[in-house]
Amino acid sequence: MSNTNACDVLIIGSGGAGLSLALRLADNAKILVLSKVGLNSGSTSHAQGGISAVFDKNDSIESHIKDTLAAGAGLCNIDAVRVTVEQGKRNIEWLKEQGVQFTEKQSKNGETSFHLNREGGHSHRRIVHTADATGKAVSKTLIERTQAHPNITLLENHNVVDLITNKKQGTELRIQGAYVLDTAIDKVKPIAAKIVILATGGASKVYLYSTNPQISTGDGIALAWRAGCRVGNMEFMQFHPTCLYHPKERSFLISEAVRGEGGKLILPDGSTFMQDYDAQLELAPRDIVARAIDNEMKKHGIDCVYLDISHKPSDFIIEHFPTIYRHCLSLDIDITKEPIPVVPAAHYTCGGVVTDLNAHTDIQGLYAVGEVAYTGLHGANRMASNSLLECLVFAERATADILDILPQMSLPLALPEWDDSQVSDSDEEIVVSHNWDEIRHFMWDYVGIVRTDKRLSRAMRRVELLKEEIAEYYGTFKVTSDLLELRNLVIVAELIIRSAQSRKESRGLHYTQDYPETDDSKPAKNTILTPKQ
């Protein structure tokens, strides 16, 4: 086994979770970071809003906890919430030490401090940001810092096929590495590791409309499920209320900060409607706002609603939302003069691979950090800007846990080579693209913002047929990146549907017309699925 095919710690994913973890570990271990495409192709670099933490003297830890619990609709793990909120401030300060330039303000006596935005669900201004492109600033800095560290190797265009475990009957499952497709040379190779980190992001591309980049196909969730890990709360898929609606653009997010700074949701005739749904109006939690928009579109037979910030001064809009302003202007929409057409779109996976408070999964040596993980922080609905916070806090906590166990961990003596002697090159690539489209269409139609038992049953029948077809295809032809994503997508789709079918109530992001009320007659339970061994 060559050195390039072995490392102390293998990190799958190059977003905020993966790279911050790599930096924290790198002085004490040899790190290999894999990126499915480019280093900045994940969701972190697309994040606009910011990172939530308590900096304002009028704010408090208890207030941030209370807001998070309220958004989570009774399913948050209080320990996960408290740990995350209490450790938020120092993690943002750590990012600043790495070189991230956050937007600041100056007081009358000349002192500078973070400029804080307010977003939906938050009772105070607590969103630290870099204008409206926070994720881009964080991603750029972390990439530069990891590239400069001698103990970190970054590999682009590497897509993981499967995790490798010891799989001996009667023994504790232990991670050994992963089979990885190097798409540049079209070859699968085993990579051995003492520790493996899943930092692969979410699964929103299982839906037709999404604010996420193309690579958000739930890979880490599917990898962990196949390896034997439990997953939790997959029915809670968050739909961002405001994705730009335009024939040339399907995935451009209009940040929640626009509503935080006074943006109003309106119908084509200019009338507002959020007063009919929630006392917090445009700053209600995302699930409420997304359902309100979905309902208004269906009620009036319209393709979109509008978000209007044009009543604010032009200079204010351009200064606070330069990215959104420039992008919309490139599509002939001047947001300083006219409203922005918007629709809801799949945005965030609140469930994921079950972990403890140190990001450890059910498999010894395997960790999951960021959107791929189910930590209990988000419950039934993630509050705005708690996601990058979770990435940072749990990366820090995983670091301490890994450094504690790493001296006792050893590399496997050898890993079996990938065997593709019985498969051939595909002459039916069209099957992959058709199946991909079918999954995303029926998930959007049947397992979207509003669900019913009948719709979920229809979706499950289609998943079962597609699973068989994809398994046959996978066993016959050489793997490609598209095929790997499709294989993962169908698993994620099944997990979402199974989870949704098991919840006989509406709660948070899961809304079903058959059970429109929240069941408060008994304690709320998380949905935990366990793979068959």
Image (tube, rainbow, N blue to C red):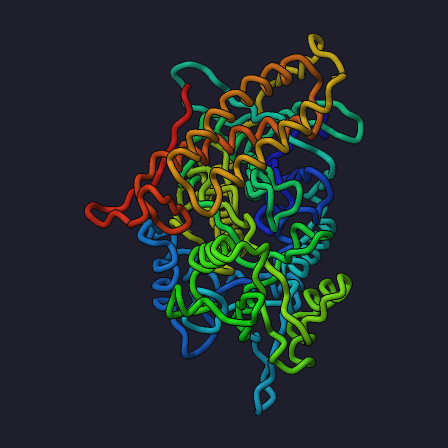
Q: How many marks?
A: 0
Q: Compare residues 138 and 127 and report the one nearer the observer.
A: 127
Q: Residue furthest right?
A: 185
Residue 366 coordinates in the image, percent (x, y): 50, 34
Question: Which of the 4 quarters of the picture holds residue 413?
Answer: top right
Is 331 rendered above or below residue 150?
A: below
* Quadrant placement of the N terminus: top right
Q: Tell me if residue 299 can be seen.
A: yes
Q: Residue at x 60, y 20 (%)?
A: 470
Residue 128 coordinates in the image, percent (x, y): 55, 68
Q: Residue furthest bottom?
A: 109
Q: Compare residues 479 and 151 and report the one nearer the observer.
A: 479
* Quadrant placement of the C terminus: top left
Q: Is residue 53 left or right of residue 60?
A: right
Question: Which of the 4 quarters of the picture holds residue 427?
Answer: top right
Q: Tell me if residue 11 can be seen.
A: no
Residue 5 coordinates in the image, percent (x, y): 69, 27
Q: Residue at x 46, y 28 (%)?
A: 460
Is 338 rendered above or below residue 235?
A: below
Q: Compare residues 197 and 13 and report the one nearer the observer.
A: 13
Q: Residue at x 68, y 29 (%)?
A: 433
Q: Residue furthest left?
A: 521
Residue 25 coordinates in the image, percent (x, y): 58, 46
